Image (cartoon, helix red, strand yellow):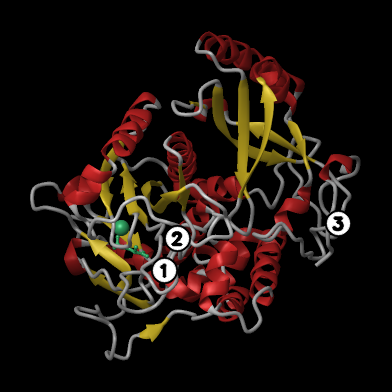
Amino acid sequence: MTGTMDVSHASGTTASRGGGPRREAAVSAEVRAERAARARVVATDLAARGVAGVAVDWVDNAGVCRVKTFPIRRLEHVAAWGVGASPVFDVFLADDSITETSWSGGPVGDLRLVPDLDRVVVSAAQPGWAWAPGDRLAQDGTAHPLCTRGFARRMQAEAARRGLALRAGFEVEWVVARAGSADEPPVVAAEGPAYGMQRVVECADYLRDLLAAFAAQDMAVLQLHPEYTAGQFEVSLAPEDGVGAADTAMAVRHTVRAVSARHGLRASFAPVVLPGSVGNGGHLHVSLWRDVVNMMQGGDRVHGLTGEAEGFVAGIVDALPGLTAVGAPSAASFLRLVPSRWAGAYRCWGWENREAAVRLITGSVGERATSANVEVKSFDGAANPYAAMGAVIAAGLDGIDRGLSLPPETHGNPEGTGAERLPASLEDAADAFERCGVLAAAMGPELHGAITAVRRAEGARFPGATAEEIVAATRWRF
Ligand code: GLU
Ligand code: MG
């Protein structure tokens, strides 16, 4: 750990130490002028809708959403030039302590955080505010190699280079508790049974306000339901492109937090909120498309997969140990990722198998052309959705490039079948991630190195800790 720092003093030199960002054309004056012109129009519209402040956010490598906010009159300038943010957040831990790598860490450097004007959400439950996901760029306007939104976009472009498009969506699970001291064990806000109608009645106003907020924000919610754990709910969203799905996952969390606060409640997306209970998943659904055809169906391989889709799914199964470090980033993740909790603790796949890390979904007969997809279940609510998305695309494309076939299917409960367990600790996940050539190559040494260092430092935070201590320390960080 390098201890505390003061981001307000970060300024000056280039973002990276050692390797530095890959060079590319800097942003031209014309592009900046176009961004400013567009922002003028957006700002006028937002101001007319009562927006006073814009929050531009990004997700760090520990999975914590960080933010800068600015008054609406600054949007034009910020859209063109970005707002300053230290690169040190690449090695922040979930408790706000800091580690380092040869590229990241320390007080020196500055990045430009640029809001994506196409993804601005006027918040329904946080009046006067708009949210926008940010891209982190170097001061010359080139990509910051550790920007995970940029990584997801690069992987999406890699798919496009092969003529493939992705349709993806995250499921978001959370536990809602009565707002109280963060030191006290949470008192959940709904006591009814798992998936129980009682919970909907108990929380009817809260859930209605959530649905209304999603609708007002033009978010395509597919369903909202009580989940297994006490006080737990889930929302799932219509598929969109990879980066968009990650943006939406974050906007869902902001919305849930904002509506919860208005009801005197507090939401946690942490991997485990109540020790010993089923946790909060962040399952990722992906389908692979060529032109207008869903390649996950209509083929001659197992369960109707096309050859390309089989390679894609096989690539994900192959990379699952390394992917665990991306999708299960906290010590608490390994309290969730255990058998018999539908968390996907085994490195295997199966048709509609909710205990397999990779669940193949064909959907209803008659609807398969659109509904067939693959679900990665081992990811949790602490995962950075951009890193998770980019990593899954990278693993899938690698499977296509290598012409991988799927291993034999796991039909029932994987327990006792000889199926391999996924890494069972942050340390083991970090080892698998460090060895994972496909993720190392896709991410580049700066991002791959930062995620490795953050996982190892997160693991070192809890020597000999009990499950209760780990859960208490992580419950309100995600
Ligand atoms: N909450 C479970 C998890 O930790 C998932 C339950 C489900 O299958 O939706 O992933
Ligand atoms: Mg669920």
Q: Are marks 1 and 3 in contact (CB under 8 Å)?
A: no
Q: Quadrant of the N terminus?
A: bottom right
Q: Are marks 2 and 1 in contact (CB under 8 Å)?
A: yes
C-alpha gap between disc 2 and disc 3? 35 Å
Relative image position of residue 421 (x, y in whole percent): 41, 83
Amino acid tagged 3? Gly
Residue at x-position 43% and y-position 36%: 259
Front-lying residue, 258 or 205: 205
Residue at x-position 26% and y-position 64%: 360
Identify the residue position indicated by label 2 in the image.
397
Q: Are marks 2 and 3 in contact (CB under 8 Å)?
A: no
Identify the residue position indicated by label 1 in the image.
315
Q: Please, is residue 427 above or below residue 237 in the view?
A: below
Point out the tag, 2 or 3, that comes first from the N-terminus. Answer: 3
Q: Please, is residue 349 above or below residue 225 in the view?
A: below
Relative image position of residue 376 (x, y in whole percent): 37, 63
Rendered image: mark on residue 106: 3
Amino acid tagged 1? Gly
C-alpha gap between disc 2 and disc 1? 7 Å
